[in-house]
Image (cartoon, grey):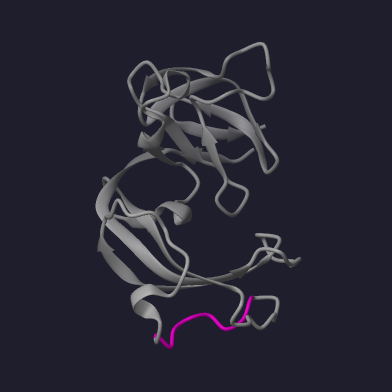
Amino acid sequence: MSEIRCFWTKPTGEEALSLRRYCSGSKCSGEAGYHDASVPIGSAPESDEPINSGKGAFANDARWPTHCSCGYAFVDADNWQVFRTNIYRADDGREWSLRDLPPGAMYDATWYHGMPDMVGPDGIALIVMLPGGGYNYWHVDGQANNNPALQGWTRSGTVPNVTANPSILTPRYHGWLRDGVLVEC
């Protein structure tokens, strides 16, 4: 039975930037299920601007992806996007973009703060990254799908040393969060 010690992360005020191409109306054997490729190009101060489709200031940038990992060659009519995602930092100085946080990373999903049913009693909308590959996250303060009678999980302790009930059940992970440790069932 594997165990993962959880740790707290906070936004840095910076965003990771990437050039993204995708074709959402297509079938692909990759993780997204459609043709999708991104190339990291650096970071910038956090922005409130929505992610926009189009080439923007990067219209002539040679770094745009040309192929999906399955080999599909993007055509001009496929989507172009300058993608931004917040960068988070652990107490030990390690940093990741939101979509690259490793299993055990915890963060406050501040975009839920206006929804009382999505926030815990400490004012944190707790997210825990789970094993299983990809962007596999668990919203601890969200609805529990393995016990519909409950509004969600109950949690105690302070981050990162949190305990939650009932068990965590996602398509890629089943386990428990006990005193800040993910314990696989």
* Main secondary structure found in the magenta portion: loop
Q: Nearer the viewer, residue 136 or 148?
A: 148
Q: Position of residue 92 (x, y in %)?
A: 27, 49
Considering only vertical position in the picture, is 121 above or below 170? above
Left or right: 142 as drawn, with respect to 59: right
Q: Is residue 173 left or right of residue 120?
A: right
Q: State the residue at coordinates (68%, 44%).
A: 172
Where is residue 127? Give x, y as percent.
46, 35
Residue 62 counted in the magenta span: yes
The quadrant in which the C terminus is found is top right
Residue 100 in the image: above or below residue 170 = below
Q: Is residue 52 magenta?
A: no
Q: Is residue 74 left or right of residue 85?
A: right
Please give the name of the residue rendered at 54% of the width and 36% of the height, measured from the top-left corner. Answer: 138
Residue 93 seen in this snapshot: no
The picture places residue 82, in percent across and down from the top left corner, at: 42, 68
Please report the bounds of the magenta region as a residue range.
Answer: 61-68
Residue 116 visible in the shown view = yes
In the image, 58 versus 122, the foreground residue is 58
Q: Position of residue 157 (x, y in %)?
A: 38, 19
Q: Quadrant of the N terminus?
A: top right
Residue occupying the point 37% across, 31% down:
160
Identify the residue shown where x is 61% and y is 74%. 78
Front position in the image: 126 or 52: 52
